[in-house]
Image (spheres, coloured by chain):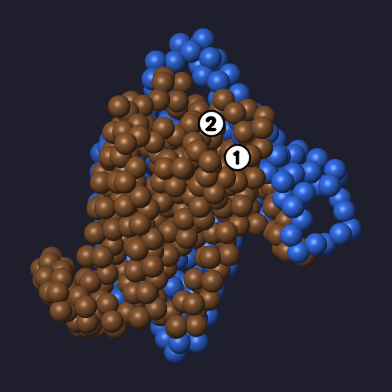
Amino acid sequence: MHIPDGYLATPVWATLDVAAAPAVGYLARRAQKSLEQSSVPLLGVMGAFVFAAQMINFPVAAGTSSHLVGAALLAYALGPAAAGVVLTAILAVQALVFQDGGILALGANVINMAIAGMLAGYLPYWLMGAGRWRRQAIFLGGFLSLLTSGVLAMGELILSGVPMPGVVIRLSLGVFLVSAVLEGAITLAIMQALTAIHPELLRQPQPDGRRALGWIGVGAIFLAVVGVAMASAYPDGIERLADATGIASRATTLLRTPLADYQLGTLGSAWLRKAGAGLAGISLIYGALLAGGKWLARKRGA
Amino acid sequence: MAGAQEGRVVHHVVLDRWSRGESVLHRRDARAKTIAVLIFLIALATAQRAFLPLSLCYLGILAATIVAAGLPLGAALKRAAVVLPFTAVFAAISLAAGEPMRAAALVGKSYLSALAVLVLVSTTPLPELLRGLERMGVPRYLLMVAQFLYRYLFVISEEAQHMRVALQTKSGTLRRALWDRGKFAAAGGALGVLFARSYAHAEGIHQAMLARGFRGHFLTLSGRSFGRADVFFVAAALVIVAGARAAVEAWI
């Protein structure tokens, strides 16, 4: 789900752009260091592969079909840092050449898919990909990556005030769940084929003594996804919670200062409160994911 | 899905041909055009009041730019409409929720944004655009990956196309089960093979690059520089875009 320009409210896209830029810079440096010299053509061609893979249809039920999205598969094959770079490059080419996803919304799309979705997909594989639960880990990774991206995108749209009646939210969550199951199944089918024909192309995950931290990461993703889904379905409750903890009022003053001269008549304070609370939540999730990614990358490099 | 993918290939080929023109706009530095488009996108994204007259005004500005660049106006307007199917869903939801102005803003903003980006990429060849982004501070590693991706998109897509045909000819059954495990695994196998082939391609490409003396970055032929005309172009874009918005908002 690529968010076009014109959908996100200014505080939402601006914050996500500001957050995405250093994250992508970090991933690029990380990938450059962790892979050998031939990595640039490899990463580019793998990006082209994910594009082209959309032409192969996976038959689902009577006449309908689905296709690979690929965040988890790339993370398994290239490692998380390189996968993040490839996915960012894909999103940039889609936004520029195919007008698929916005330019101002690029930060949001990168965070949803190339960073949060990719990390959510990688964690289960990193934890269990080498052992007895390999197949389940591969499936769970594909499932989580798509679900995380979808729920984040929906949360951002709701924060931006795009009207989403309860029916639409529940319907979208249903669609995300089905697509997530399919992504898991497709990722697993490709990984099994690859394991059979070219096992040497896949990186074997090497979990070590710090599994507990990884499990906390998986738990955090679950909580974040469920939390955003709940927040989307019941925004009033979250607003009350934010009011109670004082996050919203603080975020609101922060937001209002640079916009002081700006005509805010049409926005109203309820909107700002909602956006402020949501932004604080998204930044927390993002911070946790970035810290997790940094830690994962350090492990990989070590 | 496959049809959409072929449509994309054609879309890209058309934009690539357009980007090799020689108009005043084509001759501007990639950085100047990128900054101008960002100014436009931000002015449009932050617009709240008087949206309908403003979007008409901005449509006029973009149309004038397209004509000035010597691009076919009708075809460009049609190409930017690729965003409309996605937008239509959300516009319909907004309409159903009783917010017609929101629906109009979603359609107008996403369409005009896509059109602005289309003008940028159809007056700037992609290698030049990526080079400009590199000089603006985007990590070079990321841009090189993007450049390779773009270069090999069509090579790998063609192989995927062959596999799709092979898959269709070999796995034709009349049975329409709810869940056909065999077919699903066959598609997985095809993508596994495509993955392995892409991997092998990448190794061959890297060796060929080293053989030709690759030193870590690409060389571009037309080295444009940020001249006085580019400064003027950015200033003009700022004045026109911000001026149009101020004028419309003051007038309404």
Write down the residue under mark 1: A191
B243 sits to left or right of A199:
left
Q: Which chain is blue?
A: B
Amino acid, disc 2: Leu
Marks 1 and 2 in Cβ contact (< 8 Å): yes
Is residue B147 shown to the viewer in this render?
no
Q: Measured along the vertical axis of the image, is residue A257 above or below residue B230?
A: below
Label 1 and label 2 in one chain: yes
- Chain ID of residue with mark 1: A
Q: CA distance from mark 1 to mark 2?
A: 9 Å
Which residue is nearer to you in this view: A122 or B22?
A: A122
Residue A28 falls in image quadrant: top left
Q: Which chain is brown?
A: A
Q: Secondary structure at mark 1?
A: helix
Amino acid, disc 1: Met
Per the rendering, the mark at residue A202 is: 2
Q: Position of residue B241 (x, y in %)?
A: 31, 62
